[in-house]
Image (cartoon, helix red, strand yellow):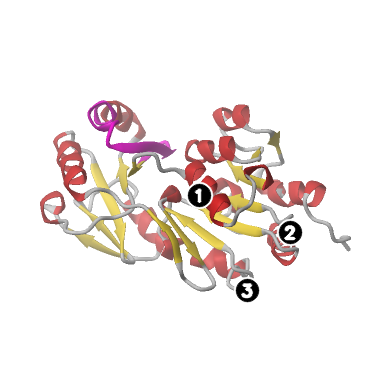
Amino acid sequence: MAKIIAVDIDGTLLNSKGKISKKTQKALEDALQEGNIVVIASGRDPKGVIQYAEILKLDRYDGLLSNYNGARITNYNTQEILINHTLNISEMKKLLEFSEDLDINYTIYYDGKCYTNSMDTYKLKDTRSKNNMEIIYDPKLSYNIDFEPNNVLFACHPDKIEEAIVQINDSFNDKFTFVKSTPYYYEVMPKGIGKGESLLEIAKYYDIPIEDTIAFGDEENDLTMIEAAGIGVAMGNAIDLVKEAADYITLSNDEDGIADYLEKFVLKRERI
């Protein structure tokens, strides 16, 4: 029986140098060759994960991209969008206006571009670097936006963002799903959408029992995926919340934790 293997990127697939190790690359390629479905599950825009999809040869084996924390699922080989959830534009505009009143900036990925209401948005340079995309600045973005994206990314210094997100969540919790992906990023998805829900949708799409799914993660935005998977695997470097929810704790991302688990419990071929 084929398994679905979902892997987060930062802190999971990538080591602390921002690279996929040769051992992890080989283990995932071997898993693909044995007929398993590998999913790169990330909050990033598709452009921000292409380089990793190419390294893992997802185009040869119909590997999947789960972007925007599960709001969009794409077959990397055919480029077919299998599942797509977007934000309601009317409710989203209210959300953006509310965040501006709290002096919280935001970025929105859409059609290969990064839109922002401020060039001073926290960690904007990191966002541009990771996702390799053009930045479109519009100080009146909350008014001018005329498209429905898959998510919104709030970015702010950790000391400031927690209090603001409490207010945002209190006002819009019934409209959107909010998840913390780093100490300074909060992501907004359509209500009921996240990496865990995405994994369930993928399993249903391929008619694979959820018991035959494995998820690797390390941060809070991986939590629903760890909980939903047949086997949730926390990296050794994962936050305590993820470790507590996991079925298994593997080695850290700097110790080839993904490869270590796959070689012990999934891969069938004799290793040389």
**Image quarter of the C terminus:** bottom right
Does dot 2 land on a helix, a strand or a loop? Answer: helix
Q: Residues within 10 Å of mark 3 (few under 14, many from 20)?
A: some
> Residue at the location (57% across, 56% down)?
39
Left or right of residue 49: residue 165: left
Amino acid type of the residue that numbered disc 1 sits on in the rendered structure: Glu
The CA span between labels 3 and 2 is 15 Å
> Residue at the location (70% across, 46% down)?
257
Instruction: Confirm whether residue 202 shows in the render.
Output: yes
Amino acid type of the residue that numbered disc 2 sits on in the rendered structure: Ala
The CA span between labels 1 and 3 is 22 Å
Mark carried by residue 201 = 1
> Residue at the location (51% across, 37% down)?
224
Q: Residues within 10 Å of mark 2 (few under 14, many from 20)?
A: many
Does dot 3 land on a helix, a strand or a loop? Answer: loop
Does dot 1 land on a helix, a strand or a loop? Answer: helix
Q: Is residue 53 inside the magenta stretch?
A: no
Tag nearer the camera, 3 or 2? 3
Residue 60: percent from the left, percent from the top?
62, 74
CB contact under 8 Å: marks 1 and 3: no
**Image quarter of the N terminus:** bottom right
The quarter holding residue 77 reads: bottom right
Q: Which residue is mark 2?
A: 27
The magenta segment is 167-186
Residue 52: percent from the left, percent from the top?
55, 64
The CA span between labels 1 and 2 is 25 Å
Of residues 115 and 170, the one nearer the viewer is 170
Tag nearer the camera, 1 or 3? 1
Amino acid type of the residue that numbered disc 3 sits on in the rendered structure: Arg
Mark carried by residue 60 = 3
Whichever of callouts 1 and 2 sits on the residue coming sooner in the sequence is 2
Instruction: Confirm whether residue 18 shows in the render.
Output: no
